[in-house]
Image (cartoon, grey):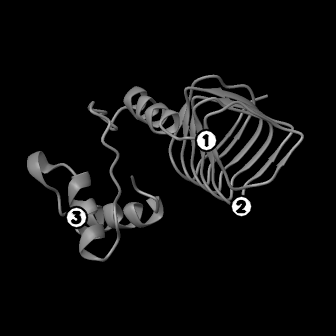
Amino acid sequence: MIRNTKILHNYLKAIVDTNSTGVGGEIQLTDALQMMIENGYTLGVIDSGVWFDCGNKESLLEGNRFVLSSLKKSIIKSELTDSIIIHPVAIESGCTISNSVVGPNSSIAKDTIVNWGIISSSIIGSGSVIKNTILKNSIIGNETSVEGEFHDINIGDNKVIQLP
């Protein structure tokens, strides 16, 4: 489990910037994880008994469902206004969630805004804005804005997507 994805992103960027590729000329996630460990960051593990290849969307969402279902109760660290939660979910601190339905099996990172959204079986990155949107089986990166009708989408960091 990586709680500070921004730090991981910085180490991956450092690998790219220095062209420090690994086996097969590819950027290795394990190199960035090792850099985190060497610099004092702690990584957590959950023994699932199964393998989740988090390099593909379906398996990453399956891993998220597994972690959430193993919780005794949902983690909700933000205030909700006129919203419904369908457990299990994880909502980090600093989020503003209003007029929305979240869950089941959804994780929302810190400082995210969800307004008039329906989010199920999805992962939303930190600092993102989700408005007037239906998301299912979706992964939204950090600091990304999504507005409009979607149902199944995968968007990286720092993007703006708007549909009528």
Residue located farthest toward the top when viewing the structure as drawn: 151
The residue that label 2 is drawn on is 94
- Label 1 neighbourhood size at 10 Å, few (<14), some (14-19), many (20+)? few
Do the residues under discs 3 and 1 have CB atoms within 8 angstroms?
no
| Image spot of residue 116 (x, y percent) | 83, 36
First of labels 2, 3 by sequence position: 3
Q: In this view, does 123 lie above or below 42?
A: above
Q: In this view, does 29 lie above or below 40?
A: above
The residue that label 3 is drawn on is 34
Q: In this view, does 128 lie above or below 10?
A: above
| Image spot of residue 135 (x, y percent) | 65, 29
For residue 99, what is the image quadrant?
A: top right
Label 3 – label 1 distance at C-alpha:
32 Å
Residue type beneath disc 1 = Lys
Position of the C terminus, as image quadrant, is: top right
| Image spot of residue 37 (x, y percent) | 27, 69
First of labels 2, 1 by sequence position: 1
- Label 3 neighbourhood size at 10 Å, few (<14), some (14-19), many (20+)? few
| Image spot of residue 16 (x, y percent) | 28, 61
Residue located farthest toward the left when viewing the structure as drawn: 23
The residue that label 1 is drawn on is 73
> Left or right: 66 with respect to 127?
left
> Left or right: 70 with respect to 54?
right
Residue type beneath disc 3 = Gln
Residue sitting at 56 percent across and 53 percent down?
142
Residue sitting at 51 percent across and 33 percent down?
69
Does dot 2 land on a helix, a strand or a loop?
A: loop
Does dot 1 land on a helix, a strand or a loop?
A: loop
